[in-house]
Amino acid sequence: MIKLLKNNFELIFWLMAIVALGVTNPGSDSHFVLCPLRLMGITWCPGCGIGHAISYLIHGDIGNSLKAHWLGIPALFVTFYRIWSLICIQIFKFKELKTYSHE
Amino acid sequence: MNNNPYASFPGVTFEEISFLRQMTTGLTESQNQTFLNLYYGRRKSPQDILIFTLIGFIGIAGVQRFVVGQIGMGIIYVFTGGFCLIGTIIDLINHKSLANEYNQKMAYESIEIARMGV
């Protein structure tokens, strides 16, 4: 179980991030903040609003998403592509093992 | 031939050695030598990836993603400060599997070239 978690760490992280952003409501002000910069008291950051942007996008609110961060749409696509390629790697790994044992 | 030529690679992991062993089973001596030369030039040490990731804390984030060939991810990292630092921390934890993933790709490429050559 722990080995499975360790091997697929990145995949699990991205999936959980997407699910978490889909579940939370971006409109409400006082939701739990994970941003380490915000917790340290620094208010400006080039990535500020990307979480809101992706969350708005999953909820279908494109206008607000662009307002929160203009990279929300490409970020979501790239994240999905990364999840897909990580899944592909896992499938490919098992296939590879089989063909090489027959050789 | 040296019994285990992969052990001399800097920062080599057990996983890397096992997949290299598995891939090079059917190769002839000279093909194996070509493969080793090609692969040695292409592979990235996990430590390099770790250092590129650490740049994310003091300068531009996402260098590690460009180095590993994930251009889209790299652009997003650069413009969002590594997903608000969280992505950088993830890559810090994950640097070994990032390097392994890239090295595996490079190993496939080198083995194809080595097979073509001889």
Image (spheres, rainbow, N blue to C red):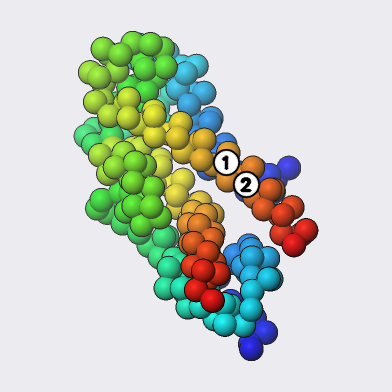
The kind of residue on which mark 1 rests is: Cys
Mark 2 residue element: helix
- Residue B47, image x and y in percent? 45, 66
Q: Farthest residue in the right direction?
A: A102
At x 27% / y 29%, what residue is drawn?
Answer: A71
- Residue B12, image x and y in percent? 55, 70
Q: Which residue is mark 2?
A: A92
Mark 1, residues whose alpha carbon is within 10 Å: few (<14), some, or many (≥20)?
few
* Marks 1 & 2, CB-CB < 8 Å contact: yes
Query: Is residue B109 among what the camera can see?
Result: yes
Mark 1 residue element: helix
The kind of residue on which mark 2 rests is: Phe
Q: Which residue is mark 1?
A: A88
Residue A2, which numbered label?
A: none
Quarter of the figure that contains the C terminus of chain B: bottom right
Label 2 resides on the chain identified as A
- Residue A99, image x and y in percent? 72, 54
Q: Nearer the viewer, residue B93 or B14?
A: B14
Q: Nearer the viewer, residue A74 or B28?
A: B28
